[in-house]
Image (tube, coloured by chain):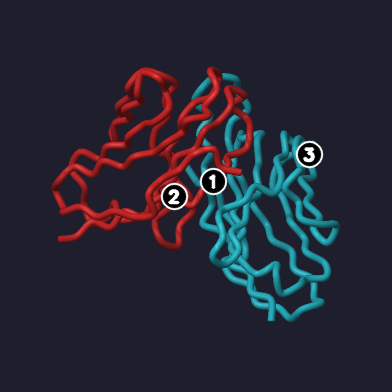
Chain colours: A red, B cyan
């Protein structure tokens, strides 16, 4: 079973920041937080991951609370192409392990 | 660089028939994973190969499913005989075999299987 909870959906205006929350209150010390997304009719796509420090890459930023029980994925300037289902996944340090997907959050970016 | 490819993209078969799905991972990726999403459900892990060996097959639903990865390159997933509940989208993913925090899995576009 997934170890994360996410709201089922949210929307934001194009060009604005999208802040996607995730709760992972049972996360263990050796587990990372990963974010993937699935755009309609495509396979899931890796976005970003982190352990305890905030992370940023060309796609997004990941903010993890100090107690690591929750995190927020930030898309700084959402575009229509960012409309997708976003999955927050907790994964053990053994980086070759499987991914356990939950229901994800459906982000709708409106014009 | 070619991504993960899957064949066929769609398959429609009748209950009781056999179907074989194929996945070609990214060249050099020793890890290969199969996942599936059945209608209205979450994406579920099926199994994991490291090269030609099955590392974890805990997600395989029953013995009607047979996965192989001969030679550690492409993989096939055979369903025999297919049942109605096998309908869904089957995803394949691959990644480098390495130890470290980032080990991004690259997913293929999926095979949509419909069992009538």
Residue A97 pos. (x, y %)? 63, 32
Dot 3: chain letter: B
**Mark sitting on residue B42:** none
Q: Secondary structure at mark 2?
A: loop
Residue occupied by mark 2: A104
**Mark sitting on residue B54:** 3
Q: Do callouts 3 and 1 point to residues on the same chain? A: no
Tag 1 and tag 2, C-beta contact below 8 Å: yes
Name the residue at 42% across, 23% down.
A68
Nearer to the camera, B47 or B59: B59
Q: Do callouts 2 and 3 point to residues on the same chain? A: no
Residue A69 lies, with reference to residue A29, above or below; the image says below
Name the residue at 73% across, 54% down.
B76
Name the residue at 70% across, 40% down.
B48
Residue A36 pos. (x, y %)? 44, 42
User: Taking B115 as reference, is B70 left or right?
Assistant: right
User: Taking A110 as reference, is B76 left or right?
Assistant: right
Q: Residues within 10 Å of mark 1 (few under 14, many from 20)?
A: many
Q: Secondary structure at mark 3?
A: strand
Nearer to the camera, A99 or B66: A99
Q: Nearer the viewer, mark 3 or mark 1?
A: 1
């Amino acid at each position: 079973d997934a170890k994360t909870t996410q709201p089922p959906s949210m929307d934001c205006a194009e060009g604005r920041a999208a802040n996607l929350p995730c709760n992972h209150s049972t996360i263990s010390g050796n587990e990372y937080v990963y974010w993937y997304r699935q755009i309609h009719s495509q396979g899931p796509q890796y976005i970003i991951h982190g352990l305890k420090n905030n992370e940023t890459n060309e796609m997004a930023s990941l903010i993890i609370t100090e107690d690591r029980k929750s995190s927020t994925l930030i898309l700084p300037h959402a575009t229509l192409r960012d409309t997708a289902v976003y999955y927050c996944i907790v994964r053990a340090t053994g980086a070759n392990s499987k991914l356990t997907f939950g229901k994800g959050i459906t982000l709708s970016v409106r014009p | 660089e070619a991504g993960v490819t899957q064949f066929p993209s769609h398959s429609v078969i009748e209950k009781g028939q056999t179907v074989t799905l194929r996945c070609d991972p990214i060249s050099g990726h020793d890890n290969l994973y199969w996942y599936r999403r059945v209608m209205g459900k979450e994406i579920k892990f099926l199994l994991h190969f490291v090269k030609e060996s099955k590392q974890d097959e805990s997600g395989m639903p029953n013995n009607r499913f047979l996965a192989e990865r001969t030679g550690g390159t492409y993989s096939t997933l055979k369903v025999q005989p297919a049942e109605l509940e096998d309908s869904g989208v089957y995803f394949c993913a691959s990644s480098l075999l390495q130890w470290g925090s980032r080990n991004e899995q690259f997913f293929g576009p999926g095979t949509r299987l419909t069992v009538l």
